[in-house]
Protein backbone atom coordinates (compact mmCIF):
# COMPACT_ATOMS: atom_id res chain seq x y z
CA UNK A 1 0.00 0.00 0.00
CA UNK A 2 1.36 3.42 -0.93
CA UNK A 3 1.85 6.25 1.54
CA UNK A 4 -1.08 8.04 -0.06
CA UNK A 5 -3.39 5.06 0.35
CA UNK A 6 -2.25 4.55 3.95
CA UNK A 7 -3.11 8.13 4.87
CA UNK A 8 -6.38 8.02 2.95
CA UNK A 9 -7.64 5.01 4.87
CA UNK A 10 -6.46 6.59 8.11
CA UNK A 11 -8.31 9.83 7.30
CA UNK A 12 -11.60 7.96 6.89
CA UNK A 13 -11.41 7.22 10.63
CA UNK A 14 -10.23 10.67 11.74
CA UNK A 15 -12.76 12.91 9.98
CA UNK A 16 -10.20 13.73 7.32
CA UNK A 17 -7.47 14.95 9.70
CA UNK A 18 -3.87 13.76 9.42
CA UNK A 19 -1.07 14.89 11.74
CA UNK A 20 2.65 14.36 11.39
CA UNK A 21 2.65 12.40 14.67
CA UNK A 22 -0.03 10.02 13.39
CA UNK A 23 1.70 9.68 10.03
CA UNK A 24 4.95 8.78 11.80
CA UNK A 25 3.17 6.03 13.74
CA UNK A 26 1.84 4.74 10.42
CA UNK A 27 5.36 4.69 8.98
CA UNK A 28 4.87 7.70 6.69
CA UNK A 29 7.84 10.13 6.81
CA UNK A 30 7.14 13.85 7.22
CA UNK A 31 8.77 14.55 3.86
CA UNK A 32 6.07 12.44 2.19
CA UNK A 33 3.39 14.63 3.75
CA UNK A 34 4.94 17.66 2.13
CA UNK A 35 5.08 15.87 -1.20
CA UNK A 36 1.42 14.85 -0.96
CA UNK A 37 0.48 18.40 -0.01
CA UNK A 38 2.32 19.68 -3.09
CA UNK A 39 0.36 17.21 -5.22
CA UNK A 40 -2.96 18.29 -3.72
CA UNK A 41 -3.76 15.09 -1.80
CA UNK A 42 -3.25 16.90 1.50
CA UNK A 43 -4.14 20.45 2.53
CA UNK A 44 -2.00 22.00 5.23
CA UNK A 45 -4.12 23.44 8.06
CA UNK A 46 -1.38 24.38 10.48
CA UNK A 47 1.88 23.21 11.96
CA UNK A 48 1.91 19.43 11.66
CA UNK A 49 -1.79 19.22 10.76
CA UNK A 50 -3.27 18.36 7.37
CA UNK A 51 -6.63 17.61 5.83
CA UNK A 52 -6.86 14.66 3.44
CA UNK A 53 -8.69 16.07 0.43
CA UNK A 54 -9.65 12.59 -0.74
CA UNK A 55 -11.59 11.83 2.45
CA UNK A 56 -15.13 13.25 2.62
CA UNK A 57 -15.75 15.72 5.47
CA UNK A 58 -18.04 14.70 8.32
CA UNK A 59 -20.17 16.74 10.75
CA UNK A 60 -17.28 16.43 13.21
CA UNK A 61 -14.47 17.44 10.85
CA UNK A 62 -14.23 21.03 12.09
CA UNK A 63 -14.04 19.82 15.70
CA UNK A 64 -11.39 17.23 14.88
CA UNK A 65 -9.37 19.90 13.09
CA UNK A 66 -9.67 22.29 16.04
CA UNK A 67 -8.28 19.85 18.63
CA UNK A 68 -5.52 18.73 16.26
CA UNK A 69 -4.43 22.33 15.70
CA UNK A 70 -4.34 23.13 19.43
CA UNK A 71 -2.28 20.02 20.14
CA UNK A 72 -2.07 17.06 22.50
CA UNK A 73 -4.45 17.06 25.49
CA UNK A 74 -6.82 19.44 23.68
CA UNK A 75 -10.53 18.91 24.32
CA UNK A 76 -13.66 20.45 22.77
CA UNK A 77 -15.21 22.49 25.58
CA UNK A 78 -18.17 24.51 26.85
CA UNK A 79 -20.80 25.66 24.33
CA UNK A 80 -18.90 23.94 21.50
CA UNK A 81 -19.80 20.61 23.13
CA UNK A 82 -23.47 21.56 23.17
CA UNK A 83 -23.26 22.66 19.53
CA UNK A 84 -21.54 19.41 18.57
CA UNK A 85 -24.48 17.47 20.04
CA UNK A 86 -27.11 19.91 18.74
CA UNK A 87 -28.25 20.90 22.24
CA UNK A 88 -29.49 24.11 23.89
CA UNK A 89 -29.92 25.99 20.59
CA UNK A 90 -26.36 27.31 20.73
CA UNK A 91 -24.48 28.34 17.61
CA UNK A 92 -21.10 29.70 18.72
CA UNK A 93 -19.05 31.67 16.25
CA UNK A 94 -15.89 29.95 17.48
CA UNK A 95 -15.09 26.44 18.65
CA UNK A 96 -13.86 26.52 22.24
CA UNK A 97 -10.96 24.16 22.93
CA UNK A 98 -9.60 23.56 26.43
CA UNK A 99 -6.03 22.50 27.08
CA UNK A 100 -3.81 22.40 30.17
CA UNK A 101 -0.80 23.29 28.04
CA UNK A 102 0.50 26.56 26.70
CA UNK A 103 -0.12 26.84 22.99
CA UNK A 104 1.84 28.99 20.59
CA UNK A 105 0.25 27.60 17.46
CA UNK A 106 -1.23 30.02 14.96
CA UNK A 107 -4.93 29.23 14.98
CA UNK A 108 -7.77 30.23 12.66
CA UNK A 109 -10.24 32.83 13.97
CA UNK A 110 -12.86 30.08 14.29
CA UNK A 111 -10.95 28.46 17.19
CA UNK A 112 -10.84 29.83 20.75
CA UNK A 113 -8.42 28.34 23.28
CA UNK A 114 -8.92 28.35 27.04
CA UNK A 115 -6.20 27.07 29.34
CA UNK A 116 -7.89 24.72 31.77
CA UNK A 117 -7.15 21.52 33.65
CA UNK A 118 -10.07 19.12 33.40
CA UNK A 119 -10.72 16.15 35.62
CA UNK A 120 -10.52 12.83 33.76
CA UNK A 121 -14.16 12.22 34.68
CA UNK A 122 -15.13 15.37 32.73
CA UNK A 123 -13.53 14.15 29.49
CA UNK A 124 -14.93 11.74 26.93
CA UNK A 125 -14.78 11.38 23.17
CA UNK A 126 -17.34 11.52 20.40
CA UNK A 127 -16.38 9.30 17.49
CA UNK A 128 -12.71 9.82 18.22
CA UNK A 129 -12.92 13.57 18.96
CA UNK A 130 -12.00 14.37 22.60
CA UNK A 131 -14.66 16.50 24.29
CA UNK A 132 -15.91 17.52 27.67
CA UNK A 133 -18.82 15.42 28.90
CA UNK A 134 -22.27 16.91 28.47
CA UNK A 135 -22.76 17.46 32.24
CA UNK A 136 -19.40 19.24 32.48
CA UNK A 137 -20.23 21.38 29.44
CA UNK A 138 -23.66 22.34 30.81
CA UNK A 139 -22.13 23.41 34.12
CA UNK A 140 -19.42 25.39 32.32
CA UNK A 141 -22.09 27.24 30.32
CA UNK A 142 -24.05 28.48 33.34
CA UNK A 143 -24.09 32.26 33.26
CA UNK A 144 -23.19 32.28 29.56
CA UNK A 145 -26.13 30.41 28.03
CA UNK A 146 -29.72 31.14 29.09
CA UNK A 147 -30.91 28.79 31.82
CA UNK A 148 -34.07 27.75 29.99
CA UNK A 149 -31.98 26.71 26.98
CA UNK A 150 -29.68 24.68 29.18
CA UNK A 151 -32.67 23.02 30.81
CA UNK A 152 -34.14 22.14 27.42
CA UNK A 153 -30.74 20.86 26.35
CA UNK A 154 -30.67 18.53 29.37
CA UNK A 155 -34.15 17.25 28.55
CA UNK A 156 -33.15 16.63 24.93
CA UNK A 157 -29.93 14.88 25.96
CA UNK A 158 -31.93 12.59 28.25
CA UNK A 159 -34.46 11.78 25.54
CA UNK A 160 -31.66 10.97 23.10
CA UNK A 161 -29.95 8.85 25.78
CA UNK A 162 -26.82 10.97 25.71
CA UNK A 163 -27.05 11.13 29.51
CA UNK A 164 -28.93 8.94 31.97
CA UNK A 165 -32.00 9.91 33.99
CA UNK A 166 -30.12 10.38 37.27
CA UNK A 167 -27.59 12.73 35.68
CA UNK A 168 -30.34 14.71 33.99
CA UNK A 169 -32.21 15.07 37.28
CA UNK A 170 -29.10 16.36 39.06
CA UNK A 171 -28.42 18.90 36.32
CA UNK A 172 -32.01 20.12 36.25
CA UNK A 173 -31.98 20.53 40.04
CA UNK A 174 -28.75 22.56 39.86
CA UNK A 175 -30.12 24.75 37.09
CA UNK A 176 -33.46 25.31 38.86
CA UNK A 177 -31.74 26.24 42.11
CA UNK A 178 -29.53 28.71 40.30
CA UNK A 179 -32.50 30.21 38.44
CA UNK A 180 -34.44 30.70 41.69
CA UNK A 181 -31.46 32.37 43.34
CA UNK A 182 -30.96 34.79 40.47
CA UNK A 183 -32.89 38.09 40.66
CA UNK A 184 -35.77 38.39 38.23
CA UNK A 185 -35.71 41.29 35.74
CA UNK A 186 -38.65 42.94 37.55
CA UNK A 187 -36.90 42.79 40.90
CA UNK A 188 -33.67 43.99 39.38
CA UNK A 189 -35.39 47.00 37.83
CA UNK A 190 -37.16 47.80 41.10
CA UNK A 191 -33.87 47.58 42.98
CA UNK A 192 -32.22 49.87 40.47
CA UNK A 193 -35.02 52.43 40.80
CA UNK A 194 -34.83 52.40 44.60
CA UNK A 195 -31.08 53.03 44.59
CA UNK A 196 -31.03 55.65 41.85
CA UNK A 197 -31.02 59.35 42.71
CA UNK A 198 -34.03 61.09 41.16
CA UNK A 199 -33.07 63.31 38.22
CA UNK A 200 -32.79 67.02 38.84
CA UNK A 201 -35.23 69.28 37.00
CA UNK A 202 -33.04 71.41 34.71
CA UNK A 203 -35.55 74.30 34.65
CA UNK A 204 -34.71 77.26 36.95
CA UNK A 205 -36.75 77.44 40.13
CA UNK A 206 -38.76 80.64 40.62
CA UNK A 207 -38.80 81.95 44.19
CA UNK A 208 -41.54 84.47 44.99
CA UNK A 209 -40.35 87.87 46.27
CA UNK A 210 -42.05 90.93 47.69
CA UNK A 211 -42.18 92.41 44.20
CA UNK A 212 -44.40 89.53 43.09
CA UNK A 213 -46.96 90.21 45.77
CA UNK A 214 -50.20 91.84 44.55
Image (cartoon, rainbow, N blue to C red):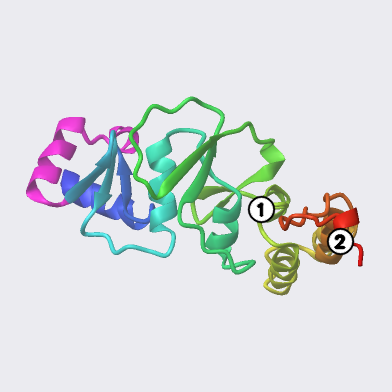
Task: Give the image location of residue 17, x and y in percent.
Answer: 33, 49
Q: Quadrant of residue 123?
A: top right
Q: Residue furthest left?
A: 39
Observer-nearest residue: 31 or 47?
A: 47
Which residue is nearer to you in this view: 152 or 206?
A: 206
* SS at mark 1 in the image: loop
Q: Which residue is mark 2?
A: 212
Label 1: few (<14), some (14–19) or many (≥20) C-alpha neighbours in 10 Å: few
Query: Residue at position x 86%, y 61% from top?
Result: 212
Left or right of 149? Residue 71 is left
Q: Is residue 186 above or below residue 13?
A: below
Bounds of the magenta span?
A: 20-41
Relative depth, front residue between 28 and 84: 84
User: Which comes sooner in the sequence, label 2 or label 1?
Assistant: 1
Whether residue 67 sits left or right of residue 143 in the image: it is left
Residue 96, magenta (yes or no): no
Q: Position of residue 191 (x, y in %)?
A: 88, 55
Query: Dot 1 corresponds to which residue?
Result: 144
The residue carrying pointer 2 sits among few (fewer than 14), some (14 to 19) or many (20 or more) residues within 10 Å by Cα, namely few
Would you identify the image quadrant in which residue 46 lies? top left
Give the residue at x 38% y 57%.
61
Amino acid sequence: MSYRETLRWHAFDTHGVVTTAEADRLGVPAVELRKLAHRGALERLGYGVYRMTEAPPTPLSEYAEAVALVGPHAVIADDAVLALHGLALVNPRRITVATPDRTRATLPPTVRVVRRHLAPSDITDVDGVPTMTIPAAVRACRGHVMTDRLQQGVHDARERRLIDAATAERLLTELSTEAEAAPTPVRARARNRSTTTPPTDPRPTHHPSTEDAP
